[in-house]
Image (cartoon, helix red, strand yellow):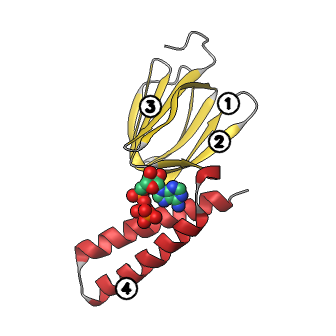
Amino acid sequence: MAENSSVLTVSIVTPDGEVYSNDECSLAIVQTKAGDMGIMADHIPLIAALKIGSAKVNFNSESDVLAINGGFVEFSNNLLTIVADSAERKGDIDVARANSAKARAEENLEKANKNQDADSMNRAEVALKRAINRINIAERN
Ligand code: ATP
């Protein structure tokens, strides 16, 4: 548990590895399926499902913005854990790759629509959301 009561520690875990591991921060803003949530030290315990969206983590003098592609956030005892399907820091997002993924998803969506294939339609819609989210975050000021 963090000793200093004005800080919390943040871990972001994905199937491809950790983005943060017990790093101290002052504030994290996450996008849950129920709405955006700002978490500071001593916040009440919570667990919530994350949507495809962003997370902002404030450190002493700087902050990171990340693309978060669904998962869960859990907070208790000043430990914030995000378990995400994938998470990339803004600066690590490969925009060309995201644009290719977007074009592929749009093609797949069109095919699925023609074939009235609901499963493929859902998959393509989610892939499209992931790609657009990455592009939006990479291009955000
Ligand atoms: P793609 O079709 O380009 O693989 P995707 O949305 O299917 O995109 P995911 O399954 O969400 O990709 O992610 C697989 C891995 O690739 C994760 O580790 C994720 O962080 C990484 N990743 C995916 N797209 C990008 C990107 N545009 N920039 C940086 N990392 C990416």
N-terminal of the pair, mark 4 or mark 2, is 2
Determine which residue is flagged by label 4: 110
CA gap, disc 4 and disc 2:
35 Å
User: Of the residues shown, which amino acid type is indicated by label 4?
Assistant: Glu
Mark 3 falls on what kind of element? strand
- Location of the C terminus by quadrant is bottom right
Q: Residues within 10 Å of mark 4 (few under 14, many from 20)?
A: some
N-terminal of the pair, mark 1 or mark 2, is 1
Mark identifier at residue 81: 3
Does residue 122 appear to the left or right of 101 in the view shown? left
The answer to whether mark 2 is within 8 Å of ligand 1 is no
Mark identifier at residue 64: 2
Q: Is residue 51 visible?
A: no
Classify 87 as above or below 120.
Answer: above
Callouts 2 and 3 close, C-beta under 8 Å: no
Does residue 115 appear to the left or right of 85 in the view shown? left
Q: What is the x, y in percent for residue 56?
A: 61, 42
Question: Image quadrant of residue 108?
Answer: bottom left
CA gap, disc 1 and disc 3:
16 Å
Residue at the image position 39 percent from the left and 48 percent from the top: 85
Residue at the image position 48 percent from the left and 28 percent from the top: 80
Mark identifier at residue 59: 1
Which residue reaches farthest top?
Answer: 3
